[in-house]
Amino acid sequence: MYLIKEIEKEEKLLLDTVKKTLQFAQNKTTSIEVFVKKTIGMSINVRNGIVENVEFNRDGALFITVYNKFSKGCVSSKDFSLNSIKNMLEIAINISKYSSSDFFSGLPDATLLCVRAINLDLFHPSELNIENTIKFVTFSEKEAFKFDKRIVNSEGSFFNSHITINVFGNSLGMLEKYKSTRYSTYNCMIAQDKNSMQRDFDYSVARKIDELEKPEILGKKTSARAISRLGSRKIQSKKSAVIFAAEIAHIFFSHLVSAINGDNVYQKSTFLLYDLKKRIFPKWFNIEEKPHLMKGLGSKPFDSEGVSTQSKYIIQDGILQTWLLNTYNARKLGLKSTGNSGGIFNWIVQYNNISFKELLKKIDQGVLVTELMGQGVDIVSGNYSRGAVGFYIEKGEIAYPVNEITISGNLRDMWNNIIGISNDVDVRNNIQSGSVFLSEMQISGN
């Protein structure tokens, strides 16, 4: 009860801060937007049964953006006092006077703004007892050690809890807010046998603390993953089928986010520059953005400019349906904002009615990729090359773990080579997908 009252008090304070800022600005500028965000949280790290740190954070920032005709001035501060707000306004206005004019800058179209924030059930505060939380984290690690004698060490067991309050207002009359909670746990264990040592991790994340993975289950799953990687081998270079495991499928599709980002489009720095309304995936393939999923980890009622978020198809029947636009890059392209300032919101990747085991059965020889390394992706050309670890597949079964391999290709070919997606959807990220089966990629090993 105390926590809820404290958050309500904090929310009122932030709302008053935005209101006062807009009031102070009335006689100074006709075009302004104000955003304030505060995060209250706690992090705990336990390693080998010893509490290494307990951190509490209470971070907040006020952002003011002023538009003087087509010139822009931005300032931010952690000081919410009246004198600070007045000084920030003066500074922002002065910056705008000396900034270069840009015809495309300015507030969003008023018709696109969120006038009433939808309640998306994102806020589930919990009165956390430090001692009990430490026991939670310690128990998870203890269960991981008990799982198998080959688990010889820990890289740590973590717990994080954060409450975030967002308030946004502008001179077009918008003043809206929403708050959210986010809880996460993470384990990383080290396994060893006579020939090798390997590490692996697992994690859980939720809006509601009761919906986190049970600590004993998370501990056991982490250990099982680490042990499964013992005896990893190198393989010969070849072209073969590849499965991106569900836990990394969001990384695979994140390159599409970059390729259709409005900034990259208007700067002509994407290989998909001429592919709007064209097919870039198989005909059966769909991705839908659903920003209003209840308790969704990527759910938001409005974007970072106050524009209402809307459900929409990103890919429909394999065809690219939209760019991801904020106000500025939309105007550069002669279009309207898609409400994606600040990112994406719950991409749901269509899957086939097939289990992961059934997906494996479709492969005679190939590689199951469970972890990616490096940043070898060129959005201008679509060329893709990343280090990987995972498992070799033979006759529809996982045969043995592999490491020190590189997978490469071109994203355009890779997307068109998607044969199927299993129903083991990982919901822990903004992009939710099952395991993705590609017919062919270049595998470089020995």
Image (spheres, helix red, strand yellow):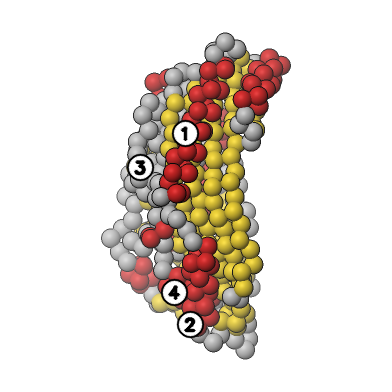
From where the camera sits, is residue 297 visible?
no
Disc number for residue 120? 3
Q: Please name the residue shown 61% across and 25% down the image.
A: 82
Q: Please name the residue shown 30% across and 64% down the image.
A: 354
Compared with 229, 212 (above or below) is above
Q: How many labels does the image show?
A: 4
- Work out whether mark 3 precedes mark 4 in sequence or the reverse, and give the earlier one: 3
| Dot 2 and dot 4 residues touching (CB under 8 Å) | no
**Is label 4 in a helix, a strand or a loop?**
helix
Picture quarter containing residue 408?
A: bottom right
The residue tagged 1 is 12
Between label 1 and label 4, give the one nearer the viewer: 1
Q: Where is residue 208 in the image (x, y as percent from the top left)?
A: 40, 55
Q: Left or right of 291: which side holds 251?
A: right
Report how far apart the C-alphas of labels 1 and 3 lie in the structure: 20 Å
Picture quarter containing residue 381?
A: top right
Report how far apart the C-alphas of labels 2 and 1 lie in the structure: 48 Å
- Work out whether mark 3 precedes mark 2 in sequence or the reverse, and give the earlier one: 3
**Is label 1 in a helix, a strand or a loop?**
helix
Q: Which amino acid does label 2 sit on?
A: Phe
In the image shown, does 176 or 356 lie closer to the viewer? 176
Report how far apart the C-alphas of labels 3 and 4 lie in the structure: 30 Å
The residue tagged 2 is 147
**Is label 2 in a helix, a strand or a loop?**
helix
In the image shown, does 255 or 283 lie closer to the viewer? 255
